[in-house]
């Protein structure tokens, strides 16, 4: 899908994705695409946090994804900005806001990840 990570940390991450030529109505391809960029960025941020935990090798497992789609970008790029809401030893919650190139909010995605220790 052409997702490019611009910044990656547990607390704040940014990614961009092209949408040129896409004319699908809201909730179809864009709804799915926004979930994909949201889940990708949120999961990566959660895994950065998991790897930073003291005492062993941890990883994040996605358990819940909620998305609200408010607009459909049809050209240019969308930017996803991920902010940590909770960073714990057993759970992370990230909220991802996806905006089009004009700054219009297209989607809000919230992902919850469990943190597990590798066996």
Image: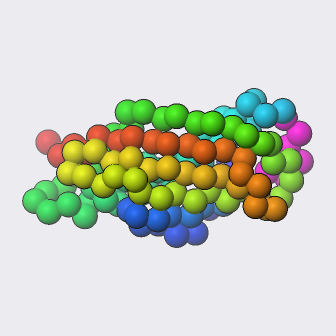
Looking at the picture, does residue 27 appear above or below residue 52? above
Q: How many marks?
A: 0
Looking at the picture, does residue 37 appear above or below residue 14? above
Looking at the picture, does residue 65 appear above or below residue 84? above
Q: Quadrant of residue 15?
A: bottom right
Determine if residue 18 is in view: no
Q: Is residue 101 left or right of residue 7?
A: right
Q: Position of residue 5 (x, y in %)?
A: 57, 63
Q: Which residue is drawn at 25% across and 64% down?
A: 52
Q: In this view, does 20 lie to the left or right of 97?
A: right
Judged by its main secondary structure, the magenta piece is loop
Q: Which residue is drawn at 13% across and 57% down?
A: 56
Q: Position of residue 90 (x, y in %)?
A: 22, 45
Q: Residue at x 62, y 56 (%)?
A: 80
Determine if residue 48 is in view: yes
Q: Which of 87 and 63 is in front in this view?
A: 87
Q: Position of residue 82 (x, y in %)?
A: 52, 57
Magenta stretch: give its range. Answer: 19-24
């Amino acid at each position: 899908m052409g997702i490019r990570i611009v910044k990656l940390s547990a607390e704040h991450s940014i990614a961009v994705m092209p949408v040129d030529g896409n004319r699908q109505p809201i909730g179809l391809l864009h709804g799915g695409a926004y979930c994909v960029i949201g889940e990708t960025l949120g999961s990566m941020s959660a895994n950065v946090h998991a790897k930073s935990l003291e005492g062993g090798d941890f990883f994040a497992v996605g358990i819940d994804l909620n998305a609200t789609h408010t607009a459909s970008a049809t050209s240019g790029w969308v930017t996803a900005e991920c902010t940590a809401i909770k960073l714990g030893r057993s759970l992370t919650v990230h909220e991802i806001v996806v905006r089009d190139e004009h700054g219009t909010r297209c989607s809000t995605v919230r992902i919850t990840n469990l943190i597990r220790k590798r066996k």
